[in-house]
Amino acid sequence: MSDDRQTVFSGLQPTGNIHIGNYLGALVNWVKLQDEYDTIYCVVDLHAITVGYDPAEYQKERLEAAKMLMACGIDPNRSLFYFQSQVPQHAELSWILGTMTPTGVLNRMTQYKEKAEAAGANLGLYSYPVLMAADILLYRANLVPVGDDQRQHLEMTRDLAERFNNRFGEVFPIPDALIPEKSARVMSLADPTSKMSKSHANEKSRVLLLDSPDVIRKKIKSAVTDSEPTVRYDWNAKPGISNLLEIMSGCTGRSIDDLAAEYETAGYGAFKEAVAESVANKLAPVRSAYQSLDDAEVARLMQKGALDARTRAEGFQQEIRKVTGLSAP
Ligand code: TYM
């Protein structure tokens, strides 16, 4: 698949609960980029085991995540698509990059600090951003479509690529993040000052991609807003409404200004109805695509993806072993 197109890489953790934030912040771009780029997408199952999990449950969740991504439009015929754990070159490159990562840099990672506080620290969680850098650099990716929360990890990846190139020669392109202008940070419906997350205990805090229109309506209706009834885009004074405006803009493609003008005096009830409808419409094709996918076929496609990915990754890793003095004697 090597051609003169630029390479795109991104990953998603298979921790269930894929939500509208993942979708608008990252997955919409993943799907779009398939038209013009050499795209590589990965269910990053090694990343997700840095917090506690149940192995039997996880086996199902991993497949479920792959199926959801296919339902969103990731096409294994156009993208290289596989489970990270099935391609050992990710872990190999991660080790090498780890030897070049100052611990001071890892100590500053905000996601590490948050997760370590919530779930307890471990070495995997600490070196998580190094594995992420390895994912991206393994394929010499140029572009990485992600939401706003991955900005710091991407910066670290760029620094590591430069550090490696300075020491061993120009091996890695310096990858750019592709972060959408709007809905790059979809906030929790229950608390619009914190990010919508897969793991928050309150299920009403997020809309899931497979939620029925009825459930979507209930969740949006209960979204926390404020008591001044004008629909206006103002993150300081009206974070709940601003979040809903961003979600609706992401789902309809209409500008925030346009939506704010239309719903300014409509009242929160009518506005929330319209938001819910836009979300339900946007997710309807995902739901129906999901229903037509077969688990065994998804598993087969993921196995094939892993085979192709291993071949491609091995070619690249041979170059790394050569420049770092680690090739076969
Ligand atoms: P993960 O699995 O948490 O999220 C997948 C993608 O969804 C984006 N995202 C959001 N976007 C907008 N609003 C939100 N509330 C929101 N929550 C999540 C994330 O930014 C991400 O793009 N570390 C990554 C996985 C990863 C990766 C990689 C990504 C591992 N290796 C290499 C890119 C390249 C993560 O935890 O994503």
Image: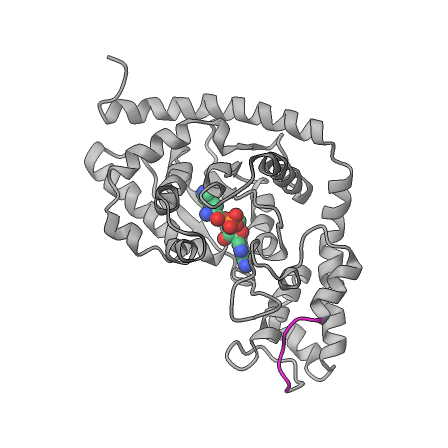
Residue 145 seen: no
- The secondary structure that dominates the magenta segment is loop
Q: Coloured how?
A: one colour
Residue 225 magenta: yes
Residue lying furthest left in this view?
Answer: 167
* The magenta segment: 222-227
Say left or right for 41 vs 317.
right
Q: Nearer the viewer, residue 9 or 310?
A: 310
Q: What is the x, y in percent for residue 66?
A: 62, 37
Residue lying furthest right in this view?
Answer: 214
Q: What is the x, y in percent for residue 157?
A: 34, 45
Say left or right for 267 vs 36.
right
Placement of 257 over or under 283, stated as above or below: below
Residue 142 seen: yes
Placement of 77 over or under 271, stated as above or below: above
Q: How many numbered marks appear?
A: 0
Q: What is the x, y in percent for residue 74?
A: 62, 39
Q: What is the x, y in percent for residue 304?
A: 59, 23
Quarter where residue 314 is shown: top left
Residue at the image position 40 percent from the left and 58 percent from the top: 117
Residue at the image position 78 percent from the left and 44 percent from the top: 288
Placement of 53 over or under 84, stated as above or below: below
Q: Quadrant of the C terminus?
A: top left
Residue at the image position 53 percent from the left and 32 percent from the top: 83
Say left or right for 137 vs 5.
left
